[in-house]
Image (cartoon, grey):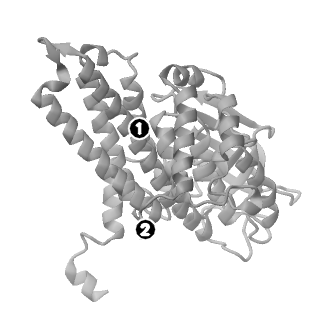
Amino acid sequence: MDAAFTAEQDEMRRTLREVLGKRCGPDEVKAAVRTAEGYDRELWQQLAQQLGLPGIAVAEEYGGVGCTPADLALACEETGRALLPSPLLATAALCAPLITALGTPAQRSALLPPLAAGTLTAALAVPGPALATALGLTGDNAAGPWSGGGRAGGVQARAAEDGAGWRLYGEVPQVLDGHSAGLLLVAAHTGGFARSRTLLFLVRQDAPGLVASRQTTLDETRPQARIELRDVSAELLGDRGDHGDHGDLDGGEADGSEVLAALAATGRTASAVLAAEAVGAAAQALARTVDYVQQREQFGRAVGSFQAVKHRLADLYVRVQAARSAAYYAAWDPEQGGLALAQALETLRVTAGEAIQLHGGIGFTWEHDAHLYFKRAAADELLFGPVHRLRAHAADRADLFTPQSRKVAV
């Protein structure tokens, strides 16, 4: 394994840091999240057109840059430093890989080019607060009724009476960037209780019966929406045979295992991207704190000159570097994404907490910039964690706690 970055990767990081440094300071972030979209549309178009940011990991045949998810992770480390509010995570890390993996050739050709160009954004709608479970981050996504289980609740899908398309019913309370996305990928159950399965459906923003309402969230840089589906027309992502009168699918992956596998694969890649983003945020929070303690004076000397403060900052530095190493390794091997994400989220939480304390009395005011990092740490752990469940699932997958006698028997 060659861990050195290429000249192209270094240039991408330098350019992105320069652009975000000019256009995405704390004041600009606070202004952008209070717009109707929740992000700066002009900056998003600049990042898409000049740097190809949303299309970094999309194949060139679909208008993307043709790089790997590792390059997307490196880019997201820089967006994490700036706490950039944008539809990048939902569009490029969650939806584009699912469309690539499951979509028909016609669907890929129609959807991936505008997603890569930034002219279309997408969001993944998973019923209930179960995004981490659906992506296989905190548990097996084949187990449990996270998408409705064929019973009441979640989102239910049935074939249209005229045999053309599908109709969706239900509600999704937490959809990342769902209020501004032009396309929704909705996870829904079909087939009834006896043959229930989870499939993904494409829903356009202007579909009759679709209601998207932006919700108040702890971290405004991660805007979320409540999605209501009231007899909404939808298109099945992929082609799995005839619908049948009751939504049964003949042929293909009738049990929905292909969809669950694609969600889990997407989760592994997304966890590496999220880990890199969290590392970028933690590194910036630490850098801002170091600058502050070098300037702030107490008892006639800089606060940063006290040994106790130096020790705390040194511990944070070691945490950030260790989390960065884990994130880079996960970008190369997504199978390690869960553990890297756990370490990065914990590092961001600890670093943000220490930043607030080391800023003293001003740091405890809710309006201080240090709280932007604290909110991001708390919100990401709620969305994609918690940390202890990420680690527990990784341990289960590695059979760390399986008795040796059972391993031999198997």
Q: Nearer the viewer, mark 2 or mark 1?
A: 2
Badge 2 amino acid: Asp
Against 181, residue 366 (above or below) is: above
Which residue matches tag 1?
A: 281
Disc 1 secondary structure class: helix
Q: Quadrant of the N terminus?
A: bottom left
Marker disc for residue 2? 2
Which residue lies most toward the right here? 162
How would you rate the neighbour count of disc 1 (Cα within 10 Å): few for under 14, some for 14-19, many for 20 or more? many
Left or right: residue 220 versus residue 339 is: right
On the image, which quarter does residue 326 sit in? Answer: bottom left
Which one is in front, 235 or 314?
314
x, y (%) of residue 312? Answer: 18, 35
Q: Residue at x 77, y 48 (%)?
A: 114
Q: Amino acid at mark 1?
A: Ala
Alpha carbon distance from label 2 to label 1: 25 Å
Disc 2, SS = loop
Horizontal side of residue 306 vs 196, given as left or right? left
Give residue 28's quadrant in the image: top right
- Counting from the top left corner in percent of width and height, residue 221 is at 52, 31
Q: Nearer the viewer, residue 389 or 197?
A: 389
Q: Residue furthest bottom?
A: 409
At label 2, counting other C-alpha atoms closer than 10 Å, the crowd grade (few under 14, some 14-19, many 20 or more) is few
- Is residue 355 among the parts visible in the rendering? yes
Which of the two discs, 2 and 1, labels the residue nearer the N terminus? Answer: 2
